[in-house]
Image (cartoon, rainbow, N blue to C red):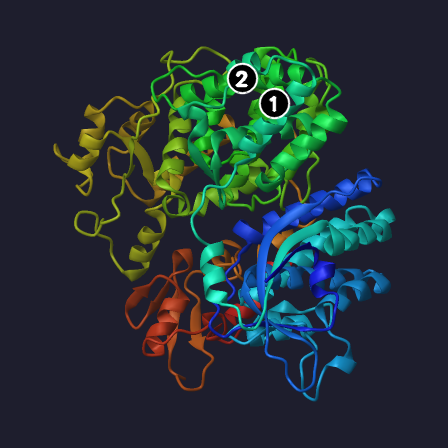
Amino acid sequence: MKTDLTTPQGIFGMPQHLTVPIYQRPYVWNEEEQWAPLWADIRRITEHRLDSPGVSAKHFLGAVVTQDAEAGPVGVQEFHIVDGQQRLTTLQIALDAAAAAFQQRDASALAARLTFLTHNDAMFAGHDDSRLKLRHTNRDRAAFDEVMLAEPPIDYAHLDHGDSLIARAHEYFTSHIGAWLDADPENITARADALAMSLQHSLELVIIRLAPDEDSQEIFETLNARGTPLTAADLIKNYVFQRLKAEGQDTIEAYRRWPFETKFWEAEVSVGRFATTRSALFLGQWLVSQVGKEISPRSTFARFKFFTEHEAGRSMSALLDLITAQAATYQQLTEIAADSHADLDRAALHLYRMSVAQVEMTKPIILWLTSPETSYRPTTVAAVIDAVESWIIRRRLLRLQSSDLGRVAAEMIAAVRGASDADVVDRVQHYLTSLQSASTYWPGDEELRSTLRSMHFYRRFSQPMQRMLLQAVEDWYRGYTSSGPSKTGIRIHRDKHQVEHILPRSWRAHWPVMDAAAEAERDDVVHRLGNLTLLTGSLNASVSNGAWLGKDGKRAALERHDAFLMNRPIVTSSADGWDEASIARRTDELIDALLSTWPVPAGHEGKTVDRVVRFSKATTSYANLVDAGLLAVGTALVCMDGRWPDACGTVLAGGQMLYDGKTYSSPAAAARVVRGGRSGNAWYFWKVEGGPSLNDLREQLLQQG
């Protein structure tokens, strides 16, 4: 067994076959948990290379185990991948995607450098033999070979395996690398060169190479056995006290000030796919607040060390004082935000809302705003938080991607750091309103109104998120977004109130309608925002599926229950009944509440320069076609497959479909019935009678953005 610390250049730099054995699990990495963090790390070290040419940043990716194959009579050396095939596959995809992006921008020499790491020279490929250095033998082989051997630019939509995770990974890296290169058109060559160098030399892996006769399973089990690795907080602690000792400080006295050895700080928390201690998470967030750059959990210690040695400009003792003070503020805000009955200031309320939304990336902003080194007034801090929270919540309401938000938050700190109390709010707002990428822009009122009016709110958000948003609506009714005093003097308690459908989900027993079309419309509106409210658990249980009118009806129960101001308009405006029109009116009113709670600066429209990427084939729904006016309710759909020439259905509200007298949730569900239970791609199964296919309509929507 041989062990080396190496780079992609060291692993892939020679002619070889790296074979993924057939028994290895298929490729499972995805955007949220692996691709986006990896790209963020690659981008970070590349930008560091551009900003500091004399200092080479590194990023450790983990360990890989290979085993020498039995030598054959001819050909290049073959290695079987024992452990790490997900990592190596993704690296190969990223290298090939970067080469494709370079080639499209006339950087052929740089593209060739990376292609050398993914493809063997023709002289090393046998007859009918793939030139790829990495080879899958399981079910991923066809998808991997197809995308890695395709000529750029790749039309992913027309690949045979375009829906595979491997093809989607390639598309992700190609698009993000291309966007990053194009962000500075005058320096594309320099950026491409820095990226190529980072991909070749700045990513580090431990490669464990086994001889053919070694027990690979034993090695695999040992490497994956349970252990207790050091956290970033452990490493930073050791480093801090070594530096304090070198400064001649009393380390015993300093240890008494070290705040991170309590249950609060040792608690394990999850951030995306990472589980870490709260202390390690805090130290990473504190570091972001200091340097104004995104830092991955895996690189916290290395970045902390670089910061203290090259950027901080102060002693370790002074840094420890600052860290200790900010840790105390952080703990106080976190604990009070978790108290459902506490009277929260703006920062604590923000932390509560972000904890529900599972957003950590604004905490560096809070640490920057509340640092002892700043002198911002509480009203200024609150105004900055208002802007940042609006940016986050509005994007969440539209379910927009969040992979770039951590970078933007860090860069915002860097952009406005040092602004005076009088200027900082305007500078933050200007920074956020200037964002025009689909991955970062601040949505305006018009887009939110259009989307929320027809959104199946109950299905789109988790119960805690629904509850938090409706609590904000209740606070709006109590006057907390107006300039005058509140009507109650207290915000709603953040108890686990129950989210109730006013028109119940099981409405057919007491709320009948005339025909299938009306049933479909009612099914479509039942989960909309205007049909939801907050109730106590006991009241919810007593009125859940009851009728609307009558002494024991839902309206009477709500009238008796006056704990929430948001329920009073329901009672006063619906004496004759609660129906689709009532839900539409209340939806508009609750949208007003949300927009007032999280406003944008006057005149901001939230335009993007690449809005088309917000829709993709993977995310577009049949309801999107209806909402966009491309597919009208009542349109007849006929089957395109000659095996079922008589199959015909009708489009209903919300992208549902009426087929053979029954309502189905989508054309896909109806198509499955036509096929006798077999699945298939309904976008190519149905077309408008005498008109385009559903796929053609989807393409129109993608073009419109």
User: Is residue 294 in view?
Assistant: no
Q: Quadrant of the C terminus?
A: bottom right
User: Is residue 63 in view?
Assistant: yes
Q: Residue at x 30, y 43 (%)?
A: 579
Q: Amino acid at mark 1?
A: Phe
Q: Residue furthest bottom?
A: 127
Q: Amino acid at mark 2?
A: Tyr
Observer-nearest residue: 502 or 22?
22
Query: How far from the left and from the top, in percent, is residue 89?
Result: 60, 64
Marking on residue 255:
2
Query: How far from the left and from the top, in percent, is residue 179?
Result: 72, 51
Query: How far from the left and from the top, in percent, is residue 497?
Result: 29, 30
Mark 1 surroundings within 10 Å by alpha-carbon count, few (fewer than 14), some (14 through 19), many (20 or more): many
Among the 4 quarters of the image, the one containing residue 479: top left
* Sequence-first tag of 2 and 1: 1
Among the 4 quarters of the image, the one containing residue 311: top right
Q: Residue at x 52, y 58 (%)?
A: 620
Query: How far from the left and from the top, in percent, is residue 132?
Result: 68, 74
Which residue in the structure is indicated by mark 1?
241
